[in-house]
Amino acid sequence: MIRTGDHQHLVPEKNEDRCTIIEVRHLTHRFDGGPGGVFDISLSIERGEFVLIAGANGSGKTTLLRHLNGLLLPQQGGVSVDGISVAKDPAQARRKVGMVFQDTDSQIVGQTVYEDVAFGPENLCWERVTIDQTVRRVLTEFDLAHLSDQSPHLLSGGERRRLTIAGVLAMRPEVLVMDEPFANLDYPGVKQILLHIVRLHRQGHTIVLAAHDLEKVGELAQRLVIMSKGRVAADGPILEVLPHVERFDIRLPCAMRFGKAVTSWLN
Amino acid sequence: MAQLSVFGYRHRPTLIHLVDVRVKLSILVAISITTLHAQWIGLMVASVVAILVLYKIRLPIRQALHELRWFLLLLLVVWMIRCLNTPGDPLVAWYGIELTHQGAVVGAMICWRWLLIVCFGMGLTASTRSVEISAAVEWGLRPLLGKSAHSVGLMIGLLMRSISLILTQTKEIADAQRSRAIENRKNPLYRMKMTALPLMRRSFLSADRMAMAIAARSYSECRTPHQWTFKRGDVIALMITFFLCSVMVLA
């Protein structure tokens, strides 16, 4: 870990030997008529890593995440997934990087739970038998099998969030990108989602999760990337970066305020 | 949790749900055209069929009436115009304005036909997933439009998905406005403006987000084809429809 620049930004030392799945190089994306966007972002994410991206509202978290599976394409710089440029092959990036959006209502397109989970595999032109097997397996994993014929609009907030993750996982992505997955969830809902995230990480998925609240997931992630005003302000192992977060308008987890270690919501 | 719109799909273990969607669409087209040409007895037959369909699907009638209230108002306006415009024996006369008996009968027939077609349409949307309807439309249009049929199918699917979303948003916005005492404003144009503007903004934003979410899940024209389920029961359904349509026309 080294400190650079006048802004005392924390940037990790490069380690070329590790197996990188996502590589972001000098990424810049500006929006017309607004201050938002991302500027000169460079970071690499390793296979199987659990990265937490934190920052205040408007810091550029969502813009960065949307570049990871080609929903936005860089104006300058580049993003590659598993060595292949996202700009050149966005379809491949979307197969490898599954994205869970903050707003569940806009993400759910099926009129039944089953139909919504099957939507992604159908887009990948899988055989009908394979789709059926995959959808049933994923629904069982996420405890949604008994709701397969239910309308998604009748599900609770936690069930809907699980459905959005199930819909993405049915496409068997290597990387799971989640934008504020705990938004609008109650305590049991947050715990359920956390359990699934931990399970998916243990199964070998690379997890990239954006949040502005470190309380819920701070203890579980391995690496913390802090974004501020569209730039990476700090990046490193979570325990090393956490003490500096209040400098970037992010609240320090409650336990740390009292000088204790951060505890998981699952304990 | 939200309440389902009467226009949304409702999963029920009924025979109507099991009918092949292409057959259902053909039945809807046939029975709607027949309804437009049917007279009293034909309309009564169609009404019995519509009531049976809606009963089997267990569509909540009170909610349906509530959601169709503006359409019912439109029907009332159409009926009034017919009463006023059709020459005949005066039913009510008031300062030279006459509501005629013949106009009332003709107007009632027109409104009855429209209402029946809407009821059959609700029966279709409540018993058929939008993805099936768009696949059937695509299947039907493919010989005429070729690859463009896929875009038409997608548009229909998204439109049907959006209707329930827009209805939910309308209710949320109306509730928010009511909580801030919009009902104290007597100007209906002002109230309409205060609902329509945020609704349009939210609808466009939702459409944008939905398009992005669909793209994120690798949507393209190349998809696993829809699995059709044309069985003997579908042939029977077509034969029953042919018989009913014949009765409605000949009666």
Image: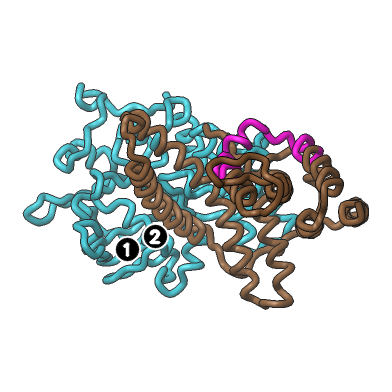
Chain colours: A cyan, B brown
Vertical side of A177 occupied by A144: above or below? above
Residue depth check, mark 2 versus mark 1: number of the one nearer the observer: 2
Instruction: Magenta stretch: give its range.
Output: B52-74
* Residue B217: percent from left, percent from top: 53, 58
- Quarter of the image for residue A64 reads bottom left
Residue at 56% of width from left, 46% of height from top? B97
Residue at 54% of width from left, 49% of height from top? B163
Q: Nearer the viewer, residue B11 or A173?
A: B11
Q: Earlier in the sequence, mark 2 or mark 1?
A: 1
Marks 2/1: CA distance?
8 Å
The kind of residue on which mark 1 rests is Val
* Residue B59: percent from left, percent from top: 70, 36
Q: Would residue A15 be found to the left or right of residue B12 on screen? A: left
Residue B65 on the magenta segment: yes
Query: To which residue does mark 2 refer?
Result: A68
Disc 2: which chain? A
Q: Would residue B162 be found to the left or right of residue A190 on screen? A: right
What is the crowding at mark 1: few (fewer than 14 residues within 10 Å), some, or many (at least 20)? many
Q: Nearer the viewer, residue B39 or A98?
A: B39
CB within 8 Å, label 2 to label 1 = yes
The kind of residue on which mark 2 rests is Leu
Residue A236 on the magenta segment: no
Q: Is residue B22 visible?
A: no
Vertical side of A122 occupied by A52: above or below? above
Q: Residue furthest front?
A: B95
Query: To which residue does mark 1 refer?
Result: A24
Q: Tell me the SS state at disc 1.
A: strand
* Residue B11: percent from left, percent from top: 71, 40
What is the crowding at mark 2: few (fewer than 14 residues within 10 Å), some, or many (at least 20)? many
**Which label sits on residue A258?**
none
